Image (spheres, grey):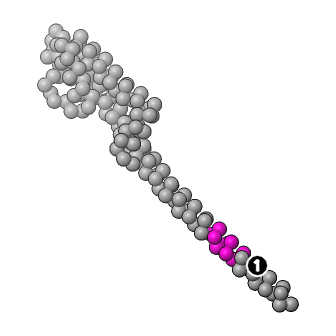
């Protein structure tokens, strides 16, 4: 299956779209939440820093340039890491399933095309044998 077809197929799937949207919403929400928790004592003080931290944490990159230092901030970080790993795992599973389904459809279409050609050959052979049998029976009838 070609990449543009896979992309179109994935974007048509409701589960895939919902998962991507959920991933973005969770990252934004927890990124903004960690700012309010860490603002006074941590190094995540602005919303852009919080969003950057959330994006790097949810994708399991974790550069370490921004880290939560308070207990509640670390709990948010752990939740974001777990959610990120689970959601990205689900995304990969959905992509894999779509690719496998596309490959199976290709092979089924190829098989059905082959079966159609075999059926047409059988029909041709049947017509030919029916003609030969009829011709022989007509010849036997005339010779009697």
Instruction: Give coordinates of residue 80: x percent, y percent.
Output: 29, 25
Residue in the picture at 16% in, 9% down: 40
Which residue appears farthest toward the top when viewing the image?
A: 40
Is residue 101 inside the magenta stretch? no
Classify mark 1: residues with Cα within 10 Å, few (<14), some (14-19) or many (20+).
few
* 38 with respect to 140 (left or right): left
Q: Which residue is mark 1?
A: 134
Q: Is residue 45 visible?
A: yes
Disc 1 secondary structure class: helix
Q: Residue at 33% of width from left, 34% of height from top?
A: 88
Q: Relative to 38, is 82 above or below?
A: below
Q: Residue 62 appears at what percent x and percent y?
A: 19, 30
How far across and down, in percent of the image, does residue 59 sit?
Answer: 26, 31
Left or right? Give the position of 101 relative to 35.
Answer: right
**Which stretch did the figure color magenta?**
122-130
Q: Residue 1 in the image: x percent, y percent?
A: 39, 48
- Depth check, front residue: 8 or 132: 132
The quadrant in which residue 5 appears is: top left
Q: Is residue 107 above or below residue 39?
A: below
């Amino acid at each position: 299956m070609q990449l543009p077809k896979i992309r179109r197929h994935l974007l048509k799937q409701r589960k895939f779209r919902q998962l991507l949207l959920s991933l973005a919403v969770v990252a934004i929400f927890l990124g903004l939440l960690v700012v309010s928790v860490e603002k006074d004592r941590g190094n995540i003080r602005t919303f852009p820093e919080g969003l950057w931290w959330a994006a790097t944490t949810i994708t399991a990159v974790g550069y370490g340039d921004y880290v939560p230092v308070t207990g509640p901030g670390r709990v948010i970080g752990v939740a974001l890491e777990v959610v990120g790993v689970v959601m990205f795992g689900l995304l990969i599973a959905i992509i894999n399933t779509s690719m496998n389904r596309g490959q199976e459809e290709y092979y089924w279409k190829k098989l059905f095309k082959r079966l159609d050609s075999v059926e047409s050959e059988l029909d041709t052979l049947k017509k030919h044998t029916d003609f030969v049998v009829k011709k022989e029976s007509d010849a036997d009838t005339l010779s009697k």
